[in-house]
Each structure stands twice: as C-alpha cells, then as structure tokens.
Image: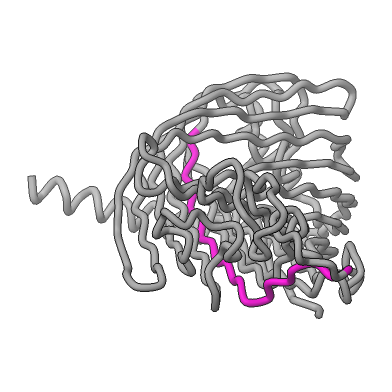
C-alpha cells in the first residue's frame, strides 16, 4: 500500500548577509537560491513488551519445558519512504510516499503502512518542531520461541496493532556560530567548525491500541494482571540539556547533538477487566547526527536520529510490565540549488519579512498586556 507522507518545513524570520557577518563567517546564507532535493529514508518503529514472566514455564501440551523469551518484539514490514523536497529562502515543503516493495515476503510477514507529518520552524533563538506519525501492521518474529506448537512458516502477524505518536520540541542554542539550519536542515552552510550547548523542552504522546492484548497468551505472566493490556497511552513532559557541534572541512561536515534530562510521564492503560492511570518520573536521552557535503550549489547528506519512549508498570521498583518503543530514522538526501531570479527572490523576502513582522507584533502586544496587568 502506498501512503502519502507530507513533511512541511516553515522557517520563520529573515536572514541576510549582515546576519552572517556578525558571527564572523561561520555561517553562510543561501536565501537567494531555490533548492530541489530527492531523499530516501528508513523510518522504523520497533515495539518491545515484557510481562516479566518466570524463567521457565509449561507449554499448553504439558510435555516440553522451555525457556520463555525475555521480550516480545514487534516490527513493521515496510518502513522505507522516498520523496522530493523544494525550498526557497526560508520556506520549504517535502513530500514522500511509502515504497511498494516490503522488506520481507508479505505472505510471511504481513503488510505494514506508515504516515508521517512534520512542521518545523525557527523563531528568534528557538527551533520549534512538531511531528505526527502513525504505524499499522506489525510482525512478531519470535513466536516459535515461546510457543512450541507453532510449526507454520508464517510469522505471527498483528495487523490489529496501531500506534499514533505526537512529538513537540522546543530547542534553544547558546552559540550563534553553530547553525542547526545548516547541519540538519541544509537551509544554511556551516563554514567553520563550531560547538554549542543547548536547552530543550519536549512533549511526547505515544498511543498504542490493539483488538487483542499486546502479549500472546504464552508470553504472559499468569500472576500479573498487566498481561491482558490492549491499550497504552504515555504522555511525557521532559526537560533536557546537552551539547551540539559541527566539524567542517572543505565543504564536508559532521554534526551531532547529545543531551540528557528528566521528565514526568502520565500513563493510561486498558486491561481485560479494568482501566488505570499512573504517574512516573523517567530519565530521557536525546541523540541526533548528520554528515555530508554541503556547498553553495549542491549537497548530499546522511542523517540519523533515535528516539526511545518507555513505560514501566506498576512502578520502576516493582516491575510487572515494560513497554518500549524504539524509533529510528536514517535518511539520505541529495539536493541542488538554483538561482531564483530577482522577482522570486523579492517575493520570498517579502513573505519572510511579513511573517517576522507579524510574529514580533503579536509578541509585542502580548508582552505589553502582561506589563499592564503587572
């Protein structure tokens, strides 16, 4: 199945040559170019569930005693996306479709689909990012390990499992010599190596739903009520801090971000005979990397980011049920920049100026109102 993925990037604020001058040539603007790009990405979501069962258990046939697996892992069969991107000035749009060729035989591993939507922008010193993605169709490739009666070549296909995720990020960098636009968005060009610290606030909502319990009967702990869970919602609010940097040499670059933090999580779950709500404090990790060749006319980049969300019930001290989602996105992006011409360049500059002026006017009125109230 082909699923259309729209990824739109709106970059607010107008960059000029003077903006680059005051940071001593570390960053070059490319607002006078229109960019076309082609990209291929592998966006995979892996789900892990563990009901912490005893080390051994009796199969239904009561004849074979075997070790139970530590984890039940679901993976999608198709996570490859191919797309096109166009950007001019500080505005851009990206669209991609899921490839029709699955990673494995669909008769054995089932069909999967993915939908992703992304909007991001830069407002003053803050980078804002909002993303939604939805996955349907997963495969349990380890079913034969915990079910000795399973003798079919097909894997356990769980086309009833649906995941929906919302991610909101707000990041602020302390050093203007480091350009997030250049390293991860190719909206600018990083001319010299630079490093910075950053602060990040993140909200994430993970929603897992299934028609049947996530765990097959033989993978459940009979002494735990959480084995019948068929719905789990995790809402995280996290604060992180860390460092970012870029190494540059003759157009080639390598950039990375690493941060750690702590957050609070609201958990809402549905079992066979009840629903429940809990809160927990959990550590958080933030990692992202990009490398490639970025010049005034063309670029080719490789990027990788990993996000992990997990939930422990009823608590970290007394663990009965563990849910972890690993989201990894690996992307290859190739682009070329063309001259816009004076008319399009003037239109883009006007649009950027209008957005910037409108935003500053709204913020100014808001600040004025707050001062009057004080």
The residue lying furthest to the front in this view is 63
Residue nearest the viewer, comparing 254 with 194: 254
Query: Does the rendering let one see residue 192?
Result: yes
Q: Give the percent coordinates (x, y) of residue 182.
A: 72, 38
Chief SS of the magenta region: strand
Q: Residue at x 60, y 65 (%)?
A: 216
Determine whether 98 is above or below 307 in the image.
Answer: below
Q: Nearer the viewer, residue 43 or 358?
A: 43
> Could you say which quadrant of the image residue 308 lies in?
top right
Q: Determine whether, in the image, residue 159 is placed left or right of residue 97.
A: left
Image quadrant in which you'd find residue 113: bottom right
Taking 197 as reference, is 255 left or right? Answer: right
In this rendering, would 251 be left or right of 111? right
**In the image as oriented, which residue stretches furthest toward the left?**
374
Q: Position of residue 77 (x, y in %)?
A: 80, 65
Closer to the camera, 234 or 242?
A: 234
Please tell me which residue is depicted at 40% across the width and 33% down the height of the picture: 262
Q: Is residue 266 magenta?
A: no
Q: Which residues are magenta?
A: 153-172
Q: Where 58 falls versus 155 (above or below)? A: above
Judge whether residue 84 can be spotted in this image. Answer: no
Q: Quadrant of the N terminus?
A: bottom right
**Location of the C terminus (image quadrant):** top left
Q: Residue at x 35, y 56 (%)?
A: 361
Residue 101 percent across, percent down from the top left: 91, 70
Eyeballing the image, is 319 above or below 335? above
Q: Nearer the viewer, residue 296 or 237?
A: 237
The residue at 66%/36% (across/down) is 288
């Amino acid at each position: 199945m082909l699923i259309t993925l729209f990824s739109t990037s709106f970059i607010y604020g107008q960059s000029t040559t003077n903006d680059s001058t005051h940071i001593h040539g570390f960053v070059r603007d490319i607002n006078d170019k229109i960019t076309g790009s082609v990209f291929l990405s592998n966006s995979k979501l892996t789900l892990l569930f563990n009901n912490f069962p005893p080390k051994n258990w009796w199969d239904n046939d009561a004849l074979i005693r075997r070790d139970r697996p530590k984890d039940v892992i679901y993976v999608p069969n198709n996570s490859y996306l191919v797309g096109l991107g166009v950007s001019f000035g500080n505005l851009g749009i990206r669209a991609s479709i899921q490839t029709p060729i699955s990673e494995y035989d669909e008769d054995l591993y089932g069909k999967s689909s993915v939908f992703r939507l992304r909007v991001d922008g830069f407002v003053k010193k803050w980078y804002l990012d909002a993303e939604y993605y939805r996955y349907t169709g997963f495969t349990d490739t380890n079913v034969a390990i915990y079910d000795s009666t399973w003798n079919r070549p097909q894997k356990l296909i769980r086309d009833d499992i649906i995941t929906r995720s919302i991610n909101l990020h707000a990041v602020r960098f302390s050093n203007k010599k480091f350009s997030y636009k250049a390293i991860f968005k190719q909206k600018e060009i990083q001319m010299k190596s630079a490093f910075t610290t950053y602060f990040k606030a993140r909200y994430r909502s993970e929603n897992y739903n299934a028609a049947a319990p996530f765990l097959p009967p033989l993978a459940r702990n009979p002494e735990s009520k959480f084995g019948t869970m068929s719905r789990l919602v995790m809402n995280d609010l996290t604060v992180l801090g860390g460092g970012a940097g870029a190494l540059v040499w003759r157009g080639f670059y390598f950039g990375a971000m690493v941060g750690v933090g702590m957050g609070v999580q609201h958990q809402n779950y549905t079992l066979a005979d009840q629903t429940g709500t809990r809160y927990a404090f959990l550590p958080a990790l933030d990692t992202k990397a990009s490398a490639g060749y970025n010049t005034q006319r063309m670029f080719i980049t490789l990027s990788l980011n990993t996000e992990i969300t997990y939930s422990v019930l009823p608590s970290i001290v007394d663990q009965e049920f563990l849910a972890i989602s690993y989201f990894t996105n690996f992307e290859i992006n190739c682009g070329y920049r063309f001259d816009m011409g004076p008319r399009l360049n003037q239109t883009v500059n006007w649009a950027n100026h209008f957005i910037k002026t409108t935003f500053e006017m709204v913020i100014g009125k808001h600040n004025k109102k707050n001062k009057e109230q004080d």
